[in-house]
Image (cartoon, grey):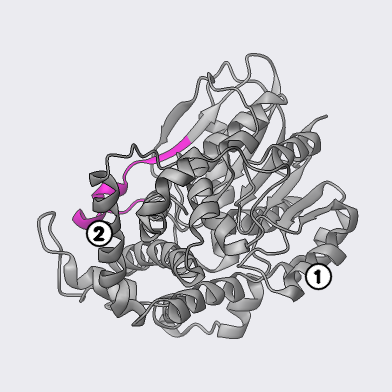
């Protein structure tokens, strides 16, 4: 979620304090950021990150599309369907990793988790999120993500395709599963589906910062944007312009810049950025993922919500009006204008209440409570969770819940204690 938007938060801070930030020493012991929103943006300082192998032989493997459809000119950038693979030289279990909202299989978190799992003896296959455009194009029979049962079936089919695509030299002795954010919630439902079907028989399943109720979580992200961005969506241009102005001032000052988590942390500790700016950045990151997903869903289904049905966009056509319409769609708009109409076409009858309930971990509470091989890592200050969600995770998972007081949404994923706990859970 940080890529492409972190710089905006950084440059909104006063550049005069950058020299001080760069001169300060390392962070205090323990995960140091006690504000959940700031942790979500800043992540983990370099000196607190886990040391993991950096020389693994990653392979980006391309699959033939699992569905037959023409690729609209406006979405050709999202081909082909790929997954990230790193294997052991000897027989080993294979861990599937499901990416979070909007993320591809090549994201930095895929690489991080692959390194952590490979170090404790796993081959690892990282999959794109069902909310990513490559997945929607190449793997989704129903290219309007958000109905959990359909997304899970399509993920499960992709896992089967990956299993069948593995190099002949890769000997798999069993399967495990993890995912982060929305991918963690989906991993829980995939595990419940597999318990009925029995294809993989996952030995271990770990949920990393899951949403409990997907739709409650995304509404919280909408609220962050609406409450903290002056002018709402109409205020985005001014917000970005302010950030770009700060960036120009920093570069003209002659300071060298490296936009990494360590620099962001030091800038955060020295500059006391406006909390409303941080909240707006988090909300804007989620809205960007939603805009990409909404545009692709509308084009692929010709829903006439963003792009008029009679308009066939070419590769050189202006996208400005459609980008604006995509950004104006809240998650509630997406449900009401794209998701529900898609599933209720041809006289079907899927209620909004059922759609929302099916994407809530409470829907499979009994399954999660009784399976000792499923655990959860979460943070009490995660902005996608409410107090009731944290209580649910504690009561449902019991001793299998590792809930830290601080870390925000995935801010402490790379923290050495988090990685150590993850590796301990997956170790034989």
Q: Nearer the viewer, mark 1 or mark 2?
A: 2
User: Outermost residue, left direction?
Assistant: 316
What is the x, y in percent for residue 67? 40, 51
Horizontally, is 212 left or right of 401 in the view? left
Q: Report crowding for label 1: few under 14, some 14 to 19, many 20 or more residues within 10 A (C-alpha).
A: few
Q: Residue at x 75, y 59 (%)?
A: 405
Which residue range is magenta in the image? Answer: 68-83
What is the x, y in percent for residue 140? 44, 56
Residue 1: mark: none
What is the x, y in percent for residue 100? 54, 53
In the image, is residue 191 part of the stretch drawn in magenta? no
Question: Which quadrant, please, contains the C terminus?
Answer: top right
Give the residue pinned by disc 2: 245
Give the residue pinned by disc 1: 391
What is the x, y in percent for residue 127? 52, 43
Q: Is residue 237 above or below residue 230?
A: above
């Amino acid at each position: 979620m940080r890529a492409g938007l972190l710089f905006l938060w950084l440059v909104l801070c006063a550049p005069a304090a950058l020299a001080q930030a760069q001169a300060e020493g390392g962070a205090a012991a323990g995960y140091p950021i006690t504000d959940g929103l700031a942790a979500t943006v800043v992540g983990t300082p370099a000196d607190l990150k886990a040391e993991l192998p950096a020389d693994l032989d990653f392979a980006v493997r391309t699959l033939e599309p699992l569905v037959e459809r023409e690729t609209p000119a406006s979405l050709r950038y999202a081909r082909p369907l790929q997954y990230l693979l790193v294997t052991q030289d000897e027989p080993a279990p294979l861990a599937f990793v499901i990416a979070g909202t909007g993320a591809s299989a090549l994201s930095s978190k895929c690489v991080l988790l692959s390194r952590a799992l490979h170090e404790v003896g796993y081959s690892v296959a990282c999959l794109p999120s069902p909310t990513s455009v490559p997945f929607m194009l190449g793997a989704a029979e129903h290219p309007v993500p958000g109905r959990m049962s359909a997304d899970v079936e399509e993920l499960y089919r992709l896992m089967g395709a990956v299993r069948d695509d593995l190099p002949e030299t890769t000997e798999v002795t069993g399967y495990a599963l993890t995912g982060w954010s929305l991918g963690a919630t989906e991993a829980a439902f995939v595990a419940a589906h597999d318990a009925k079907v029995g294809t993989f028989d996952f030995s271990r399943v770990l949920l990393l910062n899951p949403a409990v109720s997907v739709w409650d979580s995304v509404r919280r992200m909408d609220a962050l944007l609406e409450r903290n961005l002056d002018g709402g969506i109409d205020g985005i241009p001014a917000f970005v312009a302010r950030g770009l102005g700060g960036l120009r001032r920093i570069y003209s000052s002659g300071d060298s810049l490296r936009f990494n988590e360590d620099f962001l942390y030091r800038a955060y500790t020295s500059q006391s950025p406006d909390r409303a700016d941080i909240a707006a950045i988090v909300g804007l990151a989620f809205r960007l993922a939603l805009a990409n997903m909404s545009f692709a869903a509308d084009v692929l289904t010709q829903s006439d919500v963003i792009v008029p049905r009679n308009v066939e966009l070419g590769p050189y056509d202006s996208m400005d009006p459609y980008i604006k319409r995509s950004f104006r769609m809240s998650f509630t708009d997406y449900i009401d204008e794209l998701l529900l109409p898609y599933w209720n076409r041809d006289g079907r009858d899927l209620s909004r209440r059922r759609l929302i309930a099916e994407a809530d971990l409470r829907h499979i509470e009994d399954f999660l409570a009784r399976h000792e091989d499923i655990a959860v890592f979460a943070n009490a200050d995660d902005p996608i969770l409410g107090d009731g969600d944290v209580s649910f995770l504690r009561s449902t998972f019991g001793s299998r819940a590792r809930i830290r007081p601080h870390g925000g949404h995935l801010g402490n994923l790379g923290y050495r204690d988090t990685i150590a706990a993850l590796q301990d859970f997956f170790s034989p």
